[in-house]
Image (cartoon, grey):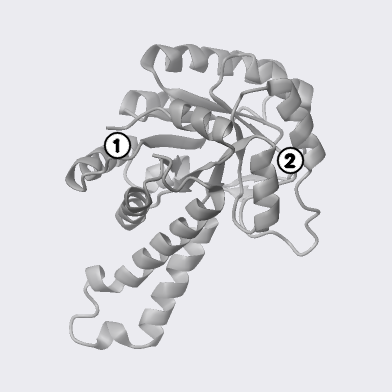
Amino acid sequence: MLVSAKDMLTKAKAGKYAVGQFNINNLEWTKSILLTAEELKSPVILGVSEGAGKYMCGYKTVVGMVNGMLEELGITVPVALHLDHGSYEGAKACIEAGFSSIMFDGSHYPIEENVAKTKELVAICNEKGMSIEAEVGSIGGEEDGVVGAGECADPEECKMIADLGVTMLAAGIGNIHGKYPENWAGLSFETLDAVQKLTGDMPLVLHGGTGIPEDMIQKAISLGVSKINVNTECQLSFADATRKYIEAGKDLEGKGFDPRKLLAPGADAIKATVKEKMELFGSVGKA
């Protein structure tokens, strides 16, 4: 059964570790992430961007697939199904479809409008026992056509949004989506520290987890980051393993073209990436 991300993140914040949000793109992704979480006894958050939701034939299809897998694979660890960078309309649609958590990204609205819309969604989520993530200061890079420059959030604005009763807060601290450029300045720990001081026990979220050096990840966790989002890294390892399989001509041997065989190395590569991240984040054995 899907759960809200609230308990797992409250525990993570208190225990100084982070829970990974791994975005799902199809059946292989979902299965690989769930099996790895179960094997490592780690809580996990499955992230779905609006673009990926559309690609997977809508939010109801996603909910059906995930609920079916939890049952059929005998998953016992806490699993949250979370809308990533949701619009106001997208958030409402996921609440209807049966997600257990949403992110409303109002960072591109004037702060007053971000506050008003967040407030309304917090009330609905509280009523339904769902968790809700809000964002202040856009995260750089591109995700589903949304481009941000990697700015740092205003800690006062973070407090304003945190005080609305959201479960977790994504604050821009110079992080970006996708691959990091050569001239990236690194994470702003000053911003993170200032935000943490004003928001107290609120679990903080780090977007764009791919490519941030391990020591920076660990430092961010020590400063209150309890949820880290990973997407690009799984895509890169999946693509790499699939390319090797085809370049080695394995799809031409016997029934190597069968999608179950063709996609198996990529699915294993996702498992390996997820395992590496869960170990780094410290969530192994925390279910």
Residues packed near mark 1 inside 10 Å, few (<14), some (14 to 19) or many (20 plus):
some
Which dot marks residue 220?
none
Does the CB distance between marks 1 and 2 fall below 8 Å?
Answer: no
Q: Nearer the viewer, residue 255 or 33?
A: 33
**Can you see residue 144?**
no
- Tell me the residue that label 2 is attached to: 173
Residue at the spot 64% in from the left edge and 14% down from the top edge: 163
Position of residue 87 relative to residue 212, above or below, is above
Helix, strand or loop under label 1? helix
Q: Earlier in the sequence, mark 1 or mark 2?
A: 1
Question: Mark 2 belongs to which amino acid?
Answer: Ile
Image coordinates for residue 226, horizontal then vertical, percent: 57, 37
Cα separation between marks 1 and 2: 32 Å
Q: Residue at x 32, y 28 (%)?
A: 97
**Quarter of the rendering containing residue 116:** top right
Percent position of residue 26, x then y:
34, 53
- The label number, if any, that marks residue 63 in the structure image: 1
Q: Is residue 159 visible?
A: yes
Picture quarter with the C terminus: top left
Q: Position of residue 254 (x, y in %)?
A: 18, 86
User: In the rendering, at what x and y percent does residue 235 appear?
Assistant: 48, 61
**Figure quadrant of residue 246:** bottom left
Task: Name the residue nearer the viewer: 209 or 52.
Answer: 209
Identity of the residue drawn at 34% across and 47% down? 56
Foreground disc of the pair 1, 2: 2
Q: Crowding near pointer 2: few (<14 within 10 Å), some, many (20+)?
A: many
Residue type beneath disc 1: Val
